[in-house]
Amino acid sequence: MVRTSLVLAALVLEAPAGCSALLERARAGARPKETATAPTTSASAVPKSRAAPVRTAPPVWMPPVPPFELPPPADPDASTPLSAEMKKALEAFEAGEHKKVKTLLEKKVRGGKGTVDEAKLLAASCTSLKDKPCTDAASAAMDAL
């Protein structure tokens, strides 16, 4: 205890010039000057973790829109009636069952035996399913037919 008070007295009485200036300021209640520049409080200096959150509206789901036109509905007077697969595929497409349309028409169109309308319907379904290879094959089949 005595040793501590002697060391403290020696430091206070014979403190270097910088230390004594700090002690005087501390006694007066002032903070010591910092040599570094003070940080700015602009928005760019604020870390992202402390930035206020930006509120946005929640996303709204929209059904995909096929980029291709649907084939026209079957005319009773038409000279070429629709195939059974095409009729089933049209019903499935209108019901939004794109996988079923792809299953019904893909082999026929890729084999080169489908019609242009079947290729268009397959391309629209594959686009809705975001199946790029199927869409490319159906588009190539439309160009070939």
Image (spheres, grey):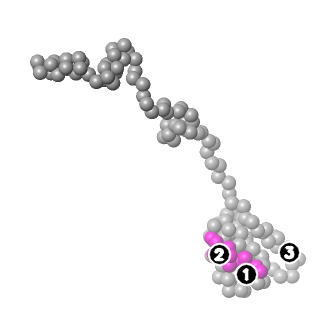
Residue in the picture at 71% in, 72% down? 123
For residue 102, side relative to residue 51 (left or right) = right
Mark 3 sits on what residue? 76
Position of residue 33 measured from the top left corner of the image (x, y, whole percent): 42, 25
Residue in the picture at 68% in, 73% down? 135
- Closest to the observer: 15 or 104? 15
Position of residue 25 measured from the top left corner of the image (x, y, whole percent): 36, 17
Label 3 close to label 2 by CB (< 8 Å): no
Tell whether position 26 is magenta.
no
Range drawn in magenta = 131-143
Disc 1 crowd rating (10 Å Cα; few below 14, some 14-19, many 20+) is many
- Amino acid type at mark 3: Pro
State how far apart marks 2 and 1 are (Cα).
10 Å
Identify the disc placed on residue 134: 2
Kind of element beneath mark 1? helix
Which SS type dominates the magenta stretch? helix
Q: Identify the image quadrant of residue 9.
A: top left
Tell whether position 136 is magenta.
yes
Q: Earlier in the sequence, mark 1 or mark 3?
A: 3
